[in-house]
Image (spheres, rainbow, N blue to C red):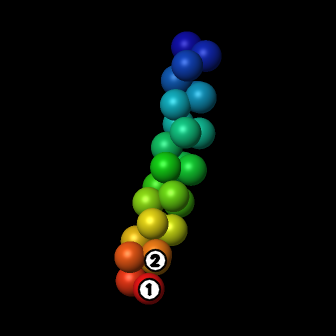
């Protein structure tokens, strides 16, 4: 059960990192 909340928090940084990565690709 402790891993579930941790995984959810990991998803947010991953989405933000992907968005940041897309911004770099645009540049």
Q: Which residue is mark 1?
A: 27
Residue under the image location 58 percent in, 28 percent down: 5
| Callouts 2 and 1 close, C-beta under 8 Å | yes
Tell me if residue 7 comes above or below residue 15 in the rendering. above
Tell me if residue 24 comes above or below residue 5 in the rendering. below
Question: Could you tell whether 12 is left or right of 23 in the image?
Answer: right
Picture quarter with the N terminus: top right
Check residue 23 in the rendering and tell me which mark sits there, or answer none: 2
Residue under the image location 45 percent in, 66 percent down: 21
Q: Quadrant of residue 25?
A: bottom left
Number of residues whose C-alpha sits closer than 10 Å to that of mark 1, classed few (under 14), some (14–19) or many (20 or more): few
Residue under the image location 51 percent in, 68 percent down: 20
Secondary element at image label 2 = helix
Which is more toward the observer, 10 or 2?
10
Q: Quadrant of residue 26?
A: bottom left
Secondary element at image label 1 = loop
Mark 2 → mark 1, Cα distance in angstroms: 6 Å
Residue under the image location 53 percent in, 60 percent down: 16
Residue 19 x %, y %? 46, 67
Q: Nearer the viewer, mark 2 or mark 1?
A: 1
Residue 4 x %, y %? 52, 23
Which is more toward the observer, 20 or 12?
20
Tell me if residue 27 comes above or below residue 2 in the rendering. below
């Amino acid at each position: 059960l402790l891993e579930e909340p941790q995984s959810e928090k990991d998803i947010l940084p991953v989405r933000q990192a992907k968005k940041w990565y897309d911004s770099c690709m645009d540049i």
